Image: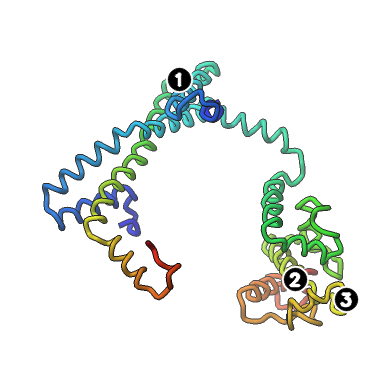
Amino acid sequence: MMAMGVPVGLALLVAGIAGTIAMTGWSAAAYTLSGQAFATASYYELSVLPLFILMGNLASASGLSRDLYEVAHRWIGHLRGGLAVADGAGLRGFRGAFGILDRLGRDHGAGGLSQYAPLWLWRKAVDGDHRGGRHFGHPDPAIDRLCALRHADRAIHRPAVHRGDPARADADRAVPGGHRGHRHPAPGRGAGHAAIRLGRALAAPRGGRRGSPPSCF
Amino acid sequence: MTIGGIYGGIFTPVEAAGVGAGFAFLMLVLRRRMTGAVISHVIRDTLRTTGMCFLILIGASVFAPFIALSGLPAVVAGRFDALPWGRRGRSC
């Protein structure tokens, strides 16, 4: 029923009543419906629901919500990457949990993530390619996003690029055969490679002329 | 205020909800936005959302006895227990 678009509560109610009628008869179903419905609606602790909903609606109607947002926007809205601050908190949490991002920072000679704000980490991860070219800011947002994803992926596999460095020997072993010696591997069949192929197709100039792909590919 | 009141032990959650709604109403009055249309919209919106929530709760409270009557939880638990997951894989 829910798949057909029936509201969740109604679907549960109808299924429950129909099932109870089929199994025990009308009287038990009527008793269940009346008793349970009344018991649920008269549950004291549930009275917070309409009150909080009313409070939210009143706050919205009085403009409190908009003003609170304006205050927050004026406090931290002028900071560039205000949204990334929240992402950064998440990144730091994940770093503490998995440690992979710290390694990411070291692989780019950054000396660890702790020296950087999270936004810096991603700039470092994405801009850290040997070519050092411009990777963000492609006029096509799809390509720009693919660039970021592609380089984030490459940054994770980056130890293979530093082959021969004793300090990164363990990292080299961690990626056996992966991208070793190939800075730009040919796309395979995986989903990530499909994204790369899509990016290359999007990057190809129209009109049949074969041009160079964007710098990140 | 409501969260602080709850955590500070000043209000129960129900009281905090009432106080919050009261202060929100006060703000509506002080900001001179209390018109008939606004009040009507707020009440209708509140009733609609509350009705939806309670319909789900009532539906769940009717659906749960049916599931218990059908014996489905016991069957599912039995099937899980029968899986060869060893001692640590038992559901109960």
Location of mark 2 (residue): A154
- Say few, some or many: other residues with alpha carbon within 10 Å of mark 2 (under 14 / 14 to 19 / 20 or more): many
Q: For numbered disc 3, what is the local secondary structure?
A: helix
Give the alpha-carbon distance from disc 1 to disc 3, as whole Å. 75 Å
Residue A96 horizontal/vertical position (percent)? 70, 55
Dot 1 and dot 3 residues touching (CB under 8 Å) = no
Q: In the rendered image, which quarter is residue A134 located in?
A: bottom right
Which quadrant: the C terminus of chain A? Answer: bottom right
- Nearer to us: label 1 or label 3: 3
Give the alpha-carbon distance from disc 3 to disc 2, as whole Å. 20 Å
| Of callouts 3 and 2, the N-terminal one | 2
- Say few, some or many: other residues with alpha carbon within 10 Å of mark 1 (under 14 / 14 to 19 / 20 or more): few
Q: In the rendered image, which quarter is residue A67 located in?
A: top right
Left or right: A13 in relation to A55: left
Residue A67 in view? yes
Residue A63 in view? no
Location of mark 1 (residue): B35
> Which disc number belongs to residue A89?
none
Q: For numbered disc 2, what is the local secondary structure?
A: helix
From what the image shows, is residue A89 above or below residue A164? above
Mark 1 falls within which chain? B
Mark 2 falls within which chain? A
Location of mark 3 (residue): A166
